[in-house]
Image (cartoon, grey):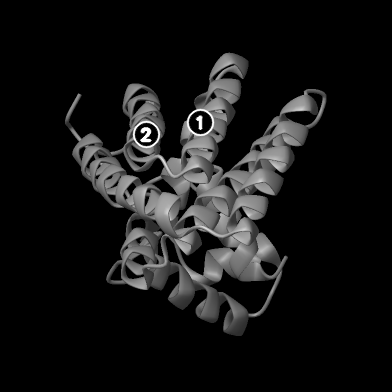
Amino acid sequence: MNVYEKIKQAIVTGLYKPGHRLTEESLTKDWEVSRTPIREALKQLEFDGLITPLKRGFSVRVFSKEDVRQVYDLRAMLESYAAGQASIHRTNGHLEKMKQANDSYEMALEKQGQEHVERIDAIVKANHVFHDAVFEASRNDHVRELISKVVVLPLIFRSFYWFDEKNLFYSLQNHHTILQAVETGDVERAKAAMTEHIFRGRDYVLHYYEGGGTDD
């Protein structure tokens, strides 16, 4: 991984916690690289919305519980619409991509002896591929662009990280339900299944989230 990916992973996995101050000096020491790649990485991370600028340096973005509610509620509206449209416009190629993503998710689930963070990272990647296939199948680039702005990686990772085995499996079952609805052209079922899937993730993040907000 390049330094940008390493710092992003450190933020997503909680090594750099919300509110943690990041400076070029400290990061060059942490990752043993020069300031140039650190500077470029910080620009990209700020663009991604993962860090916020300070007078000197940056801090890892803090999400309040109200932020979490708003992010997931907006995701539910956008992604349920995308799922409904996908059930109308999907091709066999889109369906195959969804099926392969679910297979990858299931394979990651079976590797219970693997390091937990690595296992969850594999599940998150498979989850991303599945959802991206739904967005592609919706044939609406405007919806895809809007969704990309509200999918916050640290929150997504944490929702999976806090899931127990039962809920990791349940999330995969949600994917199968969404896939079946998209495959059969059941618009309302696809929308309802996606909404339930997003709200379940929201509820877990809200239950465990320990951000800097004062809303309990």
Q: Residue at x 24, y 41 (%)?
A: 73
Q: How many labels does the image show?
A: 2
Q: Which residue is drawn at 35% across and 43% down?
A: 187
Q: How crowded is mark 2: few (under 14 residues within 10 Å), some or many (20 or more)?
A: many
**How far apart are the two marked residues, 1 and 2, measured between alpha carbons?**
8 Å
Where does the image place residue 14, in percent across and percent down from the top left?
A: 52, 42
Mark nearer the N terminus (1 vs 2): 1
Residue 188, located in which quarter of the rendered image? Answer: top left
Q: Mark 2 points at which residue?
A: 189
Q: Is the residue under label 2 in contact with that under label 1 (CB below 8 Å)?
A: yes
**For residue 180, above or below residue 54:** above
Determine whether, in the image, residue 5 is placed left or right of residue 213.
right
Q: Observer-nearest residue: 145 or 66?
A: 145
The kind of residue on which mark 1 rests is Thr
Q: Is residue 59 visible?
A: yes
Q: How crowded is mark 1: few (under 14 residues within 10 Å), some or many (20 or more)?
A: some
Q: Name the residue under label 1.
A: 177
Q: Is mark 2 on a helix, strand or loop?
A: helix
Determine whether, in the image, residue 115 is placed left or right of residue 216.
right
Where does the image place residue 86, in percent across and percent down from the top left?
A: 43, 54
